[in-house]
Image (spheres, grey):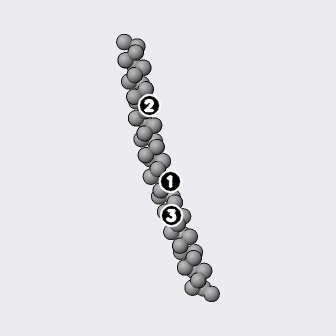
């Protein structure tokens, strides 16, 4: 009985780790896009303000 509990606990932890990794990828991608957007605006402003 105990062995099955260990296996299900390991499976649950693995699934949670996959979910966390997926969420982290999305957050990182969105934050990088926001940074790139603001950098592009800064470049456009730098060339137009001259």
Kindly identify the residue that appears in the image at 39 percent across and 28 percent down.
11
Q: Which residue is mark 2?
A: 13
Q: Which residue is identified by label 1?
A: 28
Res. 39 image quadrant: bottom right
Residue 15 drawn at (x, y percent) = 40, 35
User: Image height check: is 4 above or below 23?
Assistant: above
In the image, taking residue 10 as reference, residue 40 lies left or right, namely right
Q: On screen, 49 above or below 16?
A: below
Left or right of 13 in this view: 43: right
Which numbered disc, 3 or 2, marks the residue that appears first in the sequence? 2
- Which quadrant of the view contains residue 47? bottom right
Check disc 3 and report the residue beneath it: 34
User: Which label's residue is closer to the chain start, 2 or 1?
Assistant: 2
Q: Determine whether 17 is above or below 35 in the image.
A: above
With respect to residue 27, does 13 lie above or below? above
Q: Residue at x 51, y 58 (%)?
A: 31
């Amino acid at each position: 009985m105990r062995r099955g509990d260990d296996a299900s606990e390991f499976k649950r932890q693995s699934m949670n780790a996959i979910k966390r990794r997926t969420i982290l990828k999305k957050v990182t991608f969105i934050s990088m896009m926001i940074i790139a957007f603001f950098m592009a605006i800064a470049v456009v402003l730098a060339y137009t303000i001259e």
